[in-house]
Amino acid sequence: MIEIRNVSKKFKKGWYALKNVDLSIAKGDFLFLTGQTGSGKTTLLRLIYMDLFPDEGEVAVAGFLSSTIKEEEIPFLRRRIGIIFQDFKLLKDKTVYENVAFALEVTGQSGRKMREKVMKALTLVGLSHKRNDFPYTLSGGEQQKTAIARALVREPFILLADEPTGNIDPEGSEEIIKILQEVNTAGTAVLMATHDIALAKKMGGRFINLEQGQLTTK
Amino acid sequence: MFSLREALIGLKRNGVMTFIAIGIMFFSLFLLGAFLWGTFNLFGIINLAREKVEINAFLRENLPEKQVEELEGKLMSMVGVERVEYVSKEEALDKFQEEIKDAPSLLEAIKTNPLPPSFSIKLKDGFTSPEKVEEISEKINIFDEFIAVEYGKSWIKRLDRVVKILFLFDILLGIVISFASVFVVSNTIRLTVLARKRTIEVMKLVGATEKTVHTPFILAGAIEGGVAAAMSAGLLYLIYQLTSKFFVEFSFPHNFITIGTIAFGITLGMIGSKLAVKTTSKEMRFESTDV
């Protein structure tokens, strides 16, 4: 599903954000990507959704290769990946429902089928009752759940989570991870980047660690 | 459908920004429209003045009618001649008396008619420059039937110089105003697009194609530009209505000003938005707190 082969990524003069990273993620995996701030976690995720390209090595995602993908193909790769961030990236001027539906509307979907998909995603994260609320009325945890619903509504094969619990209190954090685990049980692979190694260990599961751009544990 | 809805929602939910953008665009397009209108009327006045350029060829007296007719034919066939009008001795005197009617003592002094018959020769557009007029006059002067050929040399030269200066000034002003309005409008649009950066970011995140990302912004730009331009053209027309009493020579060419300004506003809005969303989209990396 995802193959990262001997990838290095340089920023500025000679400073490596990632160096000789090898990683493969299979269907249904749940993987914590741990490491301190600045260790290269976000860079690794950006390489997967092809917002960045490696200086050395290659990234292969769902049949797309970093070396050959064309710019106009990137949207089609992104449609197969769900992504969530620490800052949720919700649209303030849209309701919970509209935020989730937006992910389908931009690819031309509409009508009953779309509404069903949106409601299904909102039910999964337990927010169907808040569908008409605006993001600013929600707690951090609820906002992140909205973002998860938006990421899942396209039924991606993998969910990339970049510090999804960074802005949420500990209780909310565990709830978010539980949702991610449920998502994983339903068949979607999850790659969650976090600097909170203790939390990752507590929740269990496979984890890899980045230190100054290099993988230290597999 | 999605694009139009997004465009309208974007305009509505960012109301203040939309209002400011339309206001700034309105002001720029109004200046541009006023300039075009001014230019149009300036050329109208120049043309009026140019139409007054004529050559008067004075005939010897008592020429046979046939000879005069032949001469008229020859003048008509000359390059650059638009119209030839015969002015008889009597008509010349009538005209002269009309011109000096406020000085009765002069009128009384005229006992006989001293004025010769003449041809009044109008020239075609493009033949009214001092050089051309002089050239044609010299050709006319070759005929023995004329005792004198006049064309107000110094007046034409002055007119020509004024027209050249006005023309140069107008072009310079046009360039400055065009650049300024394009610059102001495109920067305003850029601000409105930047205000909706998050929308672009999310669209890219969930796999919208470039076209899907761009279209709502281009439509919004077209709407803003169109509304601002229509308001500018409306205000110009209002000003025209209010001032037409005092400046009867002024005209308001709807095709040129109204349609021109609106078309320009819409085009500017669309191109400005397209460029702004493209740059914003290209420069944008999914902002994150980490590397």
Image (tube, helix red, strand yellow):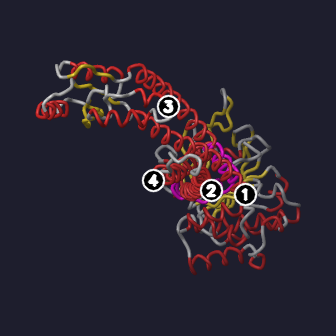
Kindly identify which residue carries mark 3. B103
Closer to the chain start, of discs 2 and 3, is 3
Q: Neighbour class for label 4 at 10 Å: few (<14), some, many (≥20)?
A: few
Q: Neighbour class for label 3 at 10 Å: few (<14), some, many (≥20)?
A: few
> Is A144 drawn above or below residue B74 in the view shown?
below
Q: Neighbour class for label 2 at 10 Å: few (<14), some, many (≥20)?
A: many
- How far apart marks 2 and 3 lie (CA) works out to 88 Å
- How far apart marks 2 and 1 lie (CA) works out to 10 Å
Of circles 2 and 4, the one toward us is: 4
Residue at image x 65%, y 47%?
A: B27
Tell me if residue B34 can be seen.
yes
B229 sits to left or right of B23: left
Kindly identify which residue carries mark 4. B255
Q: Are marks 2 and 3 in contact (CB under 8 Å)?
A: no
Q: Amino acid at mark 4?
A: Asn
- How far apart marks 1 and 4 lie (CA) works out to 47 Å
B176 sits to left or right of A166: left
Q: Nearer the viewer, residue B138 or A130?
A: B138
> Is A177 drawn above or below residue B44 in the view shown?
below
Magenta highlight on residue B198: yes
Closer to the chain start, of discs 4 and 3, is 3
Q: Are marks 2 and 1 in contact (CB under 8 Å)?
A: yes
Give coordinates of residue B36: x percent, y percent.
52, 42
Q: Which mark is residue A89?
A: 1
Kindly identify which residue carries mark 2. B205
Of circles 1 and 3, the one toward us is: 3
The residue segment tinted magenta is B185-213
Closer to the chain start, of discs 2 and 4, is 2
Q: Amino acid at mark 2?
A: Leu
Task: Look at the numbered disc 2 and give the secondary structure of its residue.
Answer: helix
